[in-house]
Amino acid sequence: MIGGSEAMAASETDTGAAMSATLAEIEALAPRLAALRAEIGRAIFGQNAVIEETLITLLAGGHVLLVGVPGLGKTLLVETLAQVLGLAARRVQFTPDLMPADILGSEVLDEGADGRRRFRFLPGPVFCQILMADEINRASPRTQSALLQAMQEGKVAIGGIEHPLPRPFHVLATQNPIEQEGTYPLPEAQLDRFLMEIDIGYPDLEDERAMLLATTSDRHLALHAVIDGEALRSAQRLVRRLPVGESVVAAILALVRGARPETAAEPGLADRIAWGPGPRAAQALMLAVRARALLDGRIAPSLDDVVALAAPVLRHRMALTFAARAEGVTLAGVIGQLVERLG
């Protein structure tokens, strides 16, 4: 029988071996992630924060909501990611008349050589690895709900038969923050399915100048796949194995719980927040900080990761009261106030 000290020593040995294996995987993946960023940078000028947050979301295994006015390169970003990641991509332009079958697929009645009739499933565009849902808020609530099931469950049920989606599977949805006529605002349940909401702003002068020269020439840019779907799935599994210190866990909980009216960090905040982030926000932030650490070649996340990712993870999972909005309070300001309390 193994004694208590011997069992403890064996356990510590196993833990040390596991950490060494994890560190070796991080070191092996680091140059490929650096090459991935560089290849994306050949097509996307500037927007470093957008590229980083999008890659973090994919490494964490989540879905992205890209918010920005037309012409900022949202479609180009999705197409570029699909090429450099070696993933099969599809694009769907969401419109009010788009039906669930237009996304998920449908059954058709076929007649075989023996004269017997049977239903055959025709997969829709959702059966891909990266789905670009362009202007997702223009689709009806019924169609949005159909996509919601695919995002959450990774499968589609047609005619009582479940069809699993390819792996990995990510939805990169776009939304125009200005033109809201004829749109159907995404319900809170669907917004919560997006790991991050990434705001895309205008490029600075030098980036826009480089973009202008590159995109109006007769040169065709050929991008190369740096990794493939299996490598991405391996990286996603590695993200979940990264250790997280107690201080980072405490900061995530303090941030998420402090953004709820019932457990607000300050009495004044409770009066400003209509509804706050649920437990899925804490899970998303935990995965995101791990993925950011991996992207930087670190074995464990830090408080800086929590601070950097607080806004894109939380801003679509909470809302302000009407009185707060009337006073000029913004979500960015509230989240900034919560982040300052982390020290």
Image (spheres, grey):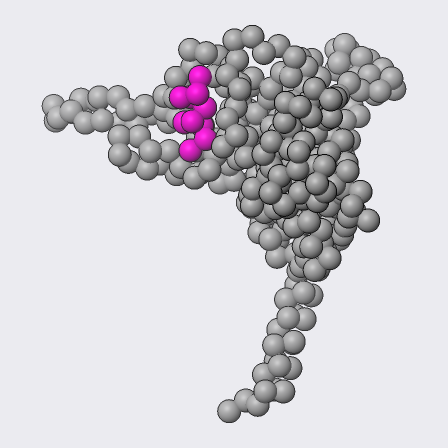
Any part of residue 124 in sight: no
Q: Position of residue 181 (x, y in %)?
A: 56, 8
Residue at screen point 76% across, 10% down: 216
Predominant secondary structure, magenta span: helix
Note whether 112 is above or below 181 in the view shown: below
Residue at screen point 63% across, 45% down: 263
Q: Verify whether residue 187 appears in magenta.
A: no
Which one is nearer the viewer's eye here, 230 or 177?
A: 177
Q: Position of residue 84 (x, y in %)?
A: 65, 33
The quadrant holding residue 24 is: bottom right
Residue closest to the far right: 206
Residue closest to the far top: 181
User: Is 206 on the left-hand or right-hand side of 54?
Assistant: right
Any part of residue 163 in sight: yes
Q: Which residues are magenta?
A: 140-149
Residue at screen point 18% across, 22% down: 111
Which one is nearer the viewer's eye here, 214 or 264?
A: 264
Q: Position of residue 208 (x, y in %)?
A: 82, 16
Residue at screen point 76% across, 42% down: 339
Q: Position of residue 155 (x, y in %)?
A: 40, 37
